[in-house]
Amino acid sequence: MGLAVSGDSAAVGVNGSATSISSAAAARLSAMLIGELSRRTGVSAKAIRLYETMNLLGPVQRRGRYRVFDDDHVGRIEIVLHSKALGLRLTEIADVMTAPGKAAASHRALRLVEARIAAEHAALATARASLERLSAARDQIAACLRA
């Protein structure tokens, strides 16, 4: 099975045959409400609404009073989750994802990751110093027990 999209139509082929469908029909095939998006991404509906207000999801279509999401929104949530796993805050992620163009977004992402690396190095230095103090205290306690 294959899918080819060009302009305002798409062709779906199964076993060598092709059926043409419009882009609108293709979009309806991947359309989902917030509950389905939540199930597919593992993110709560409340968090999805927050991501929407922070402009992390891009444009969200509405049908009446319902939000309608698609596979692009799934991908954007995956980016958010991956970025959060790297230690970035939602405001930082929003700054990158709302940058006007890929080059600007890439530069912002690079600066954020470099800053995160520096922060992790600082935290590691603090942890090493704490470990050295704990080891020294342990050695003093052990010396007292031997005496």
Image: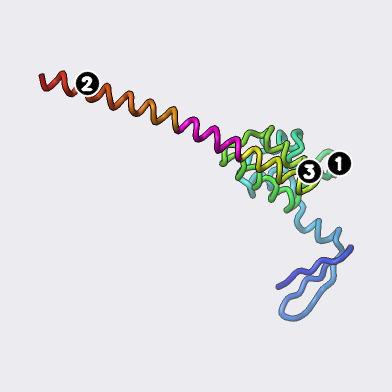
Q: Earlier in the sequence, mark 3 or mark 1?
A: 3
Q: CA distance from mark 3 to mark 1?
A: 19 Å
Q: Residues within 10 Å of mark 1 (few under 14, many from 20)?
A: few
Q: CA distance from mark 2 to mark 3?
A: 59 Å
Whether the residues at callouts 3 and 1 have beta carbons within 8 Å, the answer is: no
**Magenta extent:** 114-124
Q: Residue at x 27, y 21 (%)?
A: 137
User: Circle 2 sits on which residue?
Assistant: 140
Return the residue nearer the eye: 96 or 42: 96
Which mark identifies residue 58?
A: 3
Question: How many discs mark residues in the rendered view?
Answer: 3
User: Circle 1 sits on which residue?
Assistant: 64
Q: Residues within 10 Å of mark 3 (few under 14, many from 20)?
A: some
The amino acid sitting under disc 2 is: Gln
The amino acid sitting under disc 1 is: Gly
Q: Residue furthest bottom?
A: 16
Q: CA distance from mark 2 to mark 1?
A: 71 Å
